[in-house]
Each structure stands twice: as structure tokens, then as C-alpha cells.
Image (cartoon, rainbow, N blue to C red):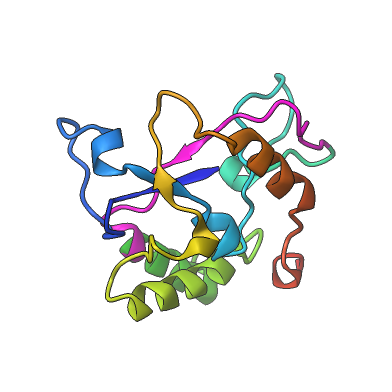
Amino acid sequence: MLDRVAPDGRLVHWWPETGLDRAFPLGGHLTHRLLRGDPRKIVLVRSGTAVASGNHRAPGHKPDPDTLACVHHFKWRAGVLDDLRRRVENFTSGTWSEHTPAVRDEAGPLLEHIDRHHGRIDVADPRLGFRRVTLDGPPTGWAAEARGIVTRWRPPATNTRR
């Protein structure tokens, strides 16, 4: 997954006339490296195969690290913080049924990061690997980088409780 953000890390509104590449020209690994979230996304599955919430995994199946697709993740836009806060509130209160605590576990680090950086994602943080990308194709070296992430990734201990 390649998390896409605005050039300065602000959580901006998107307008179709702007285009995705112009509005969110940077891609990096926010979900994986900061939030410790699942960096995988299922883009194609056989009929009848069950896919878990968020399309991050198919129970009983492993991803093939030699056939990865670059998924551009345009989640980091205006309104996402309100969405995350609402999800945390509803899952915590029991209003919504929670299958995994991943949403709550990932929301905290994001909200803390945003607060520390004055309402922005720190696109200069080298851990996150943000660089200029386009929808025309994955950035140079992405396949090897993604393969390493997918083969080494394991859910954090807090995400494995049921």
C-alpha cells in the first residue's frame, strides 16, 4: 500500500478537477511504519473466497510476494480525523461491533502525530519514505520495497487480541 498525501502533509479536500496526482503527489508508508497497520490490500480474489474487514487479508490464504499490486491509498484527506474519532467512539462504546481493535490501535498514533505536527503528516520524516509518485506506475524500487514489507509484517501484539 502506498499512502498518498498532500505536498505539505495537510489533510486537504479533494476536488475532481484537481486530479488525484496533483492533490496528493507524495506516496509513502504511513499505515505500515507509523500506525503499525496492515500494509497489505487485496485487489483480486477468487469467487467464494472470504475477505476480512478492510480487504487486508483473506483468512487461510497468504499473499504471493512475487505478484504484488501497488495500491494507492487516498485516505489521508480532509475529514479523515473526524471519521477516525467517530469510529473510535462507536467501537469503544459498543455502539458498533468490533471484530478487531486495529482501528482504535491505529487511530491513537495518527492523532498524536497530527497534533505534534500542527495538523499535518510529517512528510519529511525519513521513516515514512514519502516521495513523489503518480498513478502511472509504482515508484522505482517499489516492488522490492513492498516485497520486504509484506514478507516481514506481523500484526502488533495489541492487534492480535480477540
Image spot of residue 37 (x, y percent): 61, 58
Q: Position of residue 122 (x, y in %)?
A: 38, 66
User: Which residue: 28% across, 71% down?
Assistant: 119
| Left or right: where 62 falls relative to 146 | right
Residue name at image x 58 percent, y 37 percent? 142
Relative to 74, is 99 above or below? Answer: below
User: Which quadrant of the figure has residue 34?
Assistant: bottom right
- Foreground residue among 11 and 147: 147
The answer to whether residue 18 is above or below residue 115 is above
Taking depth in this image into account, of 62 and 86 the one nearest to the observer is 62
The N terminus appears in which quarter of the rendering?
A: top right
Please identify the residue farthest to the right as the structure is shown. Answer: 60
| Vertical side of 106 occupied by 138: above or below | above
Q: Which residue shows up at 41% across the image and 23% down it?
A: 136
- The magenta span reads 61-81
Residue 117: percent from left, percent from top: 33, 75
